[in-house]
Image: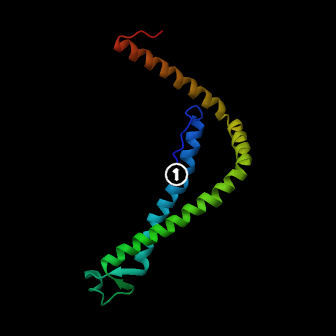
Amino acid sequence: MPIKLIDMALVTRKGIARYLYESLTGNFLGFLIGMSASGLVSRFFETKGLRNLWGLTAKKTVVSKETFGWLEWVIALVIGFVVFEVVNKVLKAYIQKEFPKLKVRLFRLLIQKQWHLRLRDLSSNVRAKRVSLYTMMSMRNGTKSE
């Protein structure tokens, strides 16, 4: 399989953000759900130990510690993969279809609450602080800013 070269002129901040969003939503959500699903194993199985008198008073199915670990790992993997696929196929398609409506609602809310003015002021304040920080750092290093 030949290696694809990326034209760096086509790489933008928006493109990188979209790539990160698409890869992280499915992967991260699948990972979180998979890890929480490993607790599902302890609902139906348990290992021998002092708490259940080495399996004599167990109310759940008793398995060895190695089998319990493998069950946790496999259940987390399977459920995490299913959630990953659902997020990638169903949820992303829904979001892409509904995004224009949500975007209009969000902009209306921003204007209604006058958040756009606050965001503009915040942006100009951050920009001014960035310039003053750069000026201070360049003066400290002995370089002239032109």
Within the image, what quadrant is residue 69 found in? bottom left
Q: Nearer the viewer, residue 120 or 16?
A: 16
Extreme residue toward the front, this view = 2
136 w.r.t. 72: above or below: above
In this picture, residue 18 sits left or right of residue 40: right
Disc 1, SS: loop
Instruction: Tell me what residue is drawn at x 56 percent, y 41 percent.
Output: 17
129 w.r.t. 7: above or below: above
Q: Position of residue 115 (x, y in %)?
A: 64, 35
Instruction: Tell me what residue is drawn at x 45 percent, y 11 percent.
Output: 145
- Amino acid type, residue under disc 1 in the picture: Met
Please name the colour scheme applied to the rendered image: rainbow
Q: Position of residue 28 (x, y in %)?
A: 49, 55
Crowding near pointer 1: few (<14 within 10 Å), some, many (20+)? few
Within the image, what quadrant is residue 109 found in? top right
Q: Nearer the viewer, residue 136 or 119?
A: 136
In this picture, residue 142 sits left or right of residue 33: left
Extreme residue toward the bottom, this view = 56
Q: Position of residue 95 (x, y in %)?
A: 67, 53
Q: Position of residue 16 (x, y in %)?
A: 55, 40
In this picture, residue 135 sits left or right of residue 108: left
115 w.r.t. 64: above or below: above
Q: Which residue is mark 1?
A: 1
Extreme residue toward the left, this view = 50
Q: How many marks?
A: 1
27 w.r.t. 115: above or below: below
Instruction: Tell me what residue is drawn at x 60 percent, y 63 percent.
Output: 86
Within the image, what quadrant is residue 122 found in? top right
Instruction: Tell me what residue is drawn at x 52 percent, y 51 percent.
Output: 1
